[in-house]
Amino acid sequence: MSKPDRPQIGYLLKEAQAVLRVRMDEVLRPLGLSVPQYVCLHLLEREPGISAAELARGAFVTRQSMNTLLQNLQDRGLVERPARPAAGRTLPAVLTGPGAEVLADAQALVDQVETRMLSRLDAQGVEGLGAALSLCIEALEAPASGS
């Protein structure tokens, strides 16, 4: 069996994602947050009232898991949802004051993890990595050629 001429980029991405997730879990645990809960709070800050389905997609969890996650955050007073939907069946969630405070603490910790992850790259390397990953995502989201 011959050795590939280039590194297995997909494997390296998955390994980097796995280690990043472990490090994020480590820093978020003292705040009582999981990575999906942190992502949920972050998305609610950026887009108050976003649907649970959109939150689930953004946090890479199922809709059922997101409903459980939202209930947990609501029980902790970090998010609020109306008792009844204003229209349709959706119960849009919004970040509370305490939720914003926990998110700010979490964001500072996650920023430290990201700084650590990128610490061996110079500014040009960081910019290049971001651009390259964006291009990879675009390529995979586009329809496959020849199909």
Image (cartoon, rainbow, N blue to C red):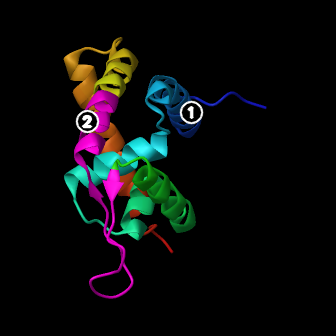
Query: Which numbered circle lies on residue 101?
Result: 2
Measure how far apart labels 1 and 2 are at the Cα level: 27 Å
Identity, as a three-letter code, of the amino acid under mark 1: Ala
Graded by Cα atoms within 10 Å as few (under 14), some (14 to 19) or many (20 or more), the crowding at tag 1 reads few
Q: Is residue 69 left or right of residue 127?
A: right
Please identify the quadrant where the N terminus is shown.
Answer: top right
Q: Is residue 28 above or below residue 50?
A: above
Identity, as a three-letter code, of the amino acid under mark 2: Glu
Q: Is residue 89 above or below residue 137?
A: below
Closer to the chain start, of discs 1 and 2, is: 1
Query: Which numbered circle lies on residue 18?
Result: 1
Dots 1 and 2: beta carbons under 8 Å? Answer: no
Q: Is residue 55 left or right of residue 13?
A: left
Q: Position of residue 15 (x, y in %)?
A: 57, 31
Q: Secondary structure at mark 1?
A: helix
The reply to whether the magenta stretch includes residue 43 is: no
Q: Position of residue 53 (x, y in %)?
A: 42, 69
Q: Return the residue nearer the eye: 67 or 72.
A: 72
Q: Which residues are magenta?
A: 79-107
Q: Position of residue 14 (x, y in %)?
A: 56, 37
